[in-house]
């Protein structure tokens, strides 16, 4: 089995994503004077849930943003976390929602700048938590009991589906080779690996938990959480840093002006219910994730 770090390096090197091939449109000052970039705005979304579910939800948000900007907004559900970073670095995205750790890589590798994230009905920035779950009948009671057991993680580069569980293993005194880590390919797949009895334990974050319970695909009474992370600030929507300042400001204002109804369908997958508006965030909001990346030895070379 490849180590997580080698897996991530290979993943980044071979990442494919749902984007048309070709050269990036526009110049380093696309959007000068606040005008729409040539070709409009390509909006990338991380694959934290089944694309068939994410696409209609984000289409509502993208259509609302398109009306605010009077620019064409093209939605791109990317194939993997590393691919989304590469797409922004290669100027194939103007706008992108990243997971918090994905934003760290995108900031360092692609000059991504956070604009907004998801608030509750009172306008407060929402958070979520990572978790590790086992069957209720399991003898695994804590992180230390995972030694020699199989643990399903979501995908390399995920905040709650990779970095935070591995950090929990480290702080519990376990080396990564002490646990048989199985990357399932995403949060839903990690949950399925557990419910289908393929692994001893799996990461299930609070967002995936809420979505699976709402869909009736996870009976919480049959499972037990043995670890929970500290709250994580919700995903930032970011802009490519080399766009013209005037257009970046238009994007920020348009995002912050969206109504809760524009965001409600997306909010169901981010455990934001009832939904609020988008609220402004900046690099300082995600400072703990920069520290996490440094602690685990992750760098821009890993994306």
Image (spheres, helix red, strand yellow):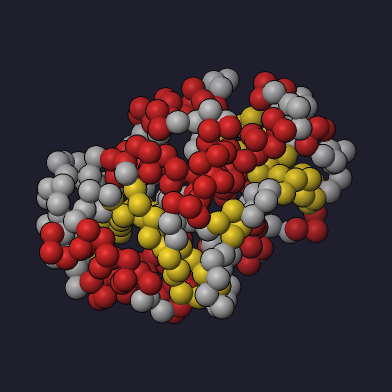
Residue 192 in the figure: left or right of residue 265? right
Q: Quadrant of residue 15?
A: top left
Residue 138 lies, with reference to residue 209, above or below; the image says: above
Residue 274 in the figure: left or right of residue 263? right
**Which residue is more in the foreground, 19 or 163?**
163
Res. 143 in view:
yes
Res. 11 in view:
no
Q: Residue 14, percent across and down? A: 35, 29
Q: Quadrant of the N terminus?
A: top right
Q: Residue 201, percent across and down? A: 72, 39
**Which residue is more in the foreground, 197 or 296?**
296
Q: Quadrant of residue 137?
A: top right
Q: Residue 94, percent across and down? A: 26, 53
**Which residue is more in the foreground, 292 or 261?**
292
Q: Quadrant of the C terminus?
A: top left
In the image, farthest residue toward the front? 284
Instruction: Count all numbered tags in the image, as a single digit.
Output: 0
Residue 75 in the figure: left or right of residue 72? right
**Residue at figure coordinates x 40%, y 32% from the top left:** 300
**Residue at figure coordinates x 77%, y 49% from the top left:** 225
**Residue at figure coordinates x 61%, y 57% from the top left:** 128
Q: Residue 100, percent across and down? A: 49, 49
Q: Quadrant of residue 4?
A: top right
**Residue at figure coordinates x 64%, y 55% from the top left:** 231
Residue 57 in the figure: left or right of residue 62? right
């Amino acid at each position: 089995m490849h180590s997580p770090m080698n897996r991530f390096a290979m993943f980044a090197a071979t990442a494919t994503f749902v984007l048309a091939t070709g050269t990036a449109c526009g110049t380093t000052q696309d959007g000068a004077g606040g005008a729409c970039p040539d070709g409009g705005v390509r909006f990338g979304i991380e694959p934290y849930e089944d694309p068939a579910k994410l696409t209609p939800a984000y289409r509502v948000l993208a259509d609302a943003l398109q009306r605010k900007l009077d620019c064409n907004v093209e939605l791109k559900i990317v194939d993997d976390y590393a691919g989304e970073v590469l797409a922004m670095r290669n100027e194939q995205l103007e706008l992108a929602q990243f997971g918090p750790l994905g934003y760290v890589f995108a900031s360092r590798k692609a000059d991504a700048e956070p604009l907004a994230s998801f608030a509750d009905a009172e306008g407060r920035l929402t958070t979520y938590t990572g978790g590790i779950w086992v069957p209720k009948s399991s003898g695994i009671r804590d992180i230390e009991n995972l030694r020699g057991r199989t643990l399903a993680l979501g995908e390399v580069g995920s905040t709650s589906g990779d970095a935070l569980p591995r950090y929990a293993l480290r702080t519990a005194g376990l080396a990564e080779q002490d646990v048989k880590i199985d990357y399932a390919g995403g949060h839903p797949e990690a949950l399925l690996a557990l419910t289908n009895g393929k692994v001893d334990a799996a990461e299930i974050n609070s967002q995936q938990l809420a979505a699976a319970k709402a869909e009736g695909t996870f009976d919480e009474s049959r499972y037990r959480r043995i670890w929970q992370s500290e709250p994580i600030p919700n995903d930032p929507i970011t802009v490519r840093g080399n766009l013209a300042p005037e257009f970046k400001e238009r994007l920020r204002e348009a995002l912050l002006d969206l109504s809760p109804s524009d965001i409600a369908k997306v909010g169901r997958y981010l455990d934001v219910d009832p939904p609020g508006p988008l609220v402004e965030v900046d690099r300082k909001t995600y400072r703990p994730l920069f520290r996490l990346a440094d602690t685990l030895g992750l760098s821009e070379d890993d994306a």
